[in-house]
Image (spheres, grey):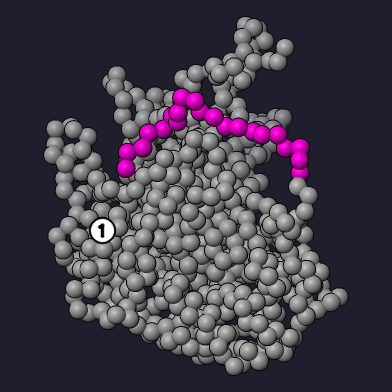
Amino acid sequence: MTTTSVPTHPLDMLAGREIEAAVRLVRDTGRLTDAARFAYIGLEEPDKELLAAFSSGARGDGSEATSVPRRVRLVIVPGPEASVIETVVDISNGSIDAWEERAETRPALLFEESMFAIIACKEHPDWQAAMRRRGITDWDKVQTDPWPAGNFGIAHEDNRRISRVLFYYRENPTDNGYARPIEGVLAFVDLGRREVLEVVDYGVVPLPPERGGYLPADVGAMRTDLKPLEITQPEGASFTVEGNLVQWQKWSMRVAMDPYEGLVLHTIGYEDADGKGGRRVRPILHRASVSEMVVPYGEPGPMHHWKNAFDAGEWGLGRMANSLKLGCDCVGLIHYFDVDFATEQGGPFTLENAICMHEEDYGILWKHADLHGGTTEVRRSRRLVVSSISTVGNYEYGFYWYFYLDGTIQLEVKLTGIMSTMAVAPGEVPPNTTMVAPQLAAPYHQHLFNVRLDVDIDGSSNTVYEVNADPAAPGPDNPMANTIQVSATALETELQAKRLVDPARSRSWKIVNPGVLNGLGQPVAFKLVPGSTPTLLADPDSSVGRRAGFASRNLWVTPYRADERRAAGEHPNQHAGGDGLPAWTAADRPIVDTDLVVWHTFGVTHVPRPEDWPVMPVEYAGFHLVPFGFFDRNPALDVPPTANGHCEADH
C-alpha cells in the first residue's frame, strides 16, 4: 500500500503542485536569476493556535473549522557567493510573507554542485599529476567523495561555499571504493564557482591490496541452513491510514518527512477514557524529529583531522532518504508513504516508498503464572514501526520509531554501511585507528544525534524533573543500610537544564503536567529513559566543539519557539560555531509550567572492529519515552490473549 500527499489537513506533506506554486511565486518576483538554486523547500508548519482551532472545528464539536494557510519555506542560493535567501510564501493567497537575504551563510551542500566538483577535480592538472604519481591513469576508476569542509579559518573559506574532496580507487565498478583510499591527496573546491582551489599531496601511500568486496559473488558460499521465516497477517493490518494520519490501537499521529530532518512525526496522542464514560485522545508529543547529528573523527593527521559531518544540516536526512522499493528493509504487511520533494532547480519529484510502516511481534508484553490460583496469563507484545533509511555517503542510518501497546514510545537508530577509511604503509599501525584489513585502517569517531521533542503531556503546560536513585546513609532510619532514595528535582531554567546522564544513579528525566492528575492524585508524566549516551569528545574550543555545542550535553530544555528548530542552528555548514542550543539557552529563560521542547543527545562512540569490515553489522542507539503516572494502571490489560494457535505446545 502506498499513499501520495493530497493536502486535506494543515500538517499534510507538501504535494508536488504546491512545490511548483511556491517556486513560481518566488520566480515571479523577478528577484532571482536562472542561476538560483533551491537548497530547501519544505512546509512552514502552522502556528499551534491556528492548528488547535482547526482541529477543534474538524472534530465536529460545534465550532467551524478554521482555515489554515498553506505556507512554504524556501532556502535559495542566488549565486556562487556565500549567501542565501530565506523566504516564506503563502500559496493559499499567492503572497510573499517573508524575504531575508543572509550573507556569510551556507546551506546544505547542493548535489548539482557536488557533481561538478567531481568533474572539476578530474580535469585539474594537479590532480591528474597526483594520480600519475600513484600509477593511476584511468580517471574512471577513481571514486570521488565531496565532504563538508568545516570551519577552520583558512583562506579558502572566505566568502566561498567549499568542499574538501577525498578519493578512492575502484578497479571494477562493483568494487568497494572505501577498501582502497588514495591516501595523501586532498582537493579544495569552490562549489559555487565550480573551481578547484588547491590540490594537496601529502605523499604517496600504496593502495591497500584487498578489494573489500561484500556482494554475494565476493563472499562465495552462502549459508544453506536458514529455513524460511514467514510473517503473515491474513486478516490485514491493525492500523488505518487517511492521508498522513495514522491510527493504530489507541495511538494516533501524523507522518511526514522534512528535507533536512528526515522522518518527522506530528500530534502523537493516545486514546483513553475521559472519565465521563467517553473517549478522548490525550496529547503526548506535538512534534518529534532528529534535529541534527554530527560525525566527528578523532584521527589527528592532515588528511583526516578536519573530518566532521553534520549529516542533517550539511547534507539532509530527507534529501538522502532511500526509496524502500527493493530489498528487505521492512517485512510483513507494509504500508509505504511516498514523499514529494523539490529538485535544486525547483521542480517537484516523488521519492516512492520513502517511509515504511508495519507491525511486528515483540515477545512478551506481560505474564504471570499464579502458583496459588493455578492460572497463567500471558500477552504478546506488538509494536507499530514507522521507519526511514538515509544513505549519507558511506554510512546508512535507519530511523525507527516504535509505538507499543503499553503506551511506550521508542526511537531506535540503526547504524550500518561502510566505515570511512585510510590507507597506511605496510607494517604501519597508526594510533587512534583500528586496522580492519591489510594496510587499511578505520579512525575512531562518533555518531551523535540530537532529537527535538516538542512535548505536550496532556497539554502544553509542562515541567521537566531530573530523577536520581541514591543509597541512603546508614542510620536509625536505615538500619540494614539497604534503603534506596529517589529524588526528583525540577529544572527551572535553561542553564540548569543542561544535563548529563549518570548511569550509576539510574538518571532519567520526567516530563510532568502539574495541572492534570491521575486517579491516584499524582501529576501525569512521561519519563525519558536514556540509552547509549556519549557526548562530544572533542575539546569545546575545537572547531567541531564550537559548531556542535549541542553534543556536549545529553539534555537541553527550552521554552517553545517556532524558529528554534535545529540543535546546531539553521545553517551549520561552514559556520564558525556557537549557534543553536548554546546560543538560545544563554538567555536562561524560565522553563516551568510552560510549553516546552526537550532536546536529547545520544549516539555511539565507534571504536572500529575488524568485524565491522567490509560492511558494518547494525549498531543501535536511541531512547524510550515511558508513561509514568500517565495512566492509573497497566494500560495493556485489555490486550487479548493470542488465539492463532501458534502458542500451543507441540504434542
Query: How many numbered discs sit on the rendered protein?
Result: 1
Task: Report if residue 76 lies within the magenta region.
Answer: no
What residue do we see at 32% from left, 42% from top?
243
Task: Report if residue 238 lies within the magenta region.
Answer: yes
The answer to whether 617 is drawn above or below residue 247 in the figure is below
- Tell me, yes or no, if residue 461 can be seen here: no
Secondary element under disc 1, as helix, strand or loop, is helix
- Residue that protrudes farthest toward the top in the picture: 373
- Tell me, yes or no, if residue 107 can be seen here: yes
What residue do we see at 53% from left, 50% from top?
326
Picture coordinates of residue 273, whole percent (x, y)? 34, 24
Name the chief secondary structure element in magenta.
Answer: loop
| Residue on which the image places disc 1 | 18
What residue do we see at 33% from left, 81% from top?
35
Which residue is more in the foreground, 334 or 394? Answer: 334
Picture coordinates of residue 55, whole percent (x, y)? 23, 41
The answer to whether 610 is drawn above or below residue 274 in the figure is below
Range shown magenta: 223-243
Instruction: Residue 230: name its quadrant.
Output: top right
The answer to whether 179 is drawn above or below residue 636 in the figure is below
Identity of the amino acid at label 1? Glu
Looking at the image, residue 371 sits to the left or right of residue 27; the answer is right
Looking at the image, residue 105 sits to the left or right of residue 553; the answer is left
Instruction: Residue 566: name its quadrant.
Output: bottom left
Quadrant location of the N terminus in the rendered image = top left
Which residue is more in the foreground, 486 or 155? Answer: 155
Picture coordinates of residue 477, whole percent (x, y)? 64, 31
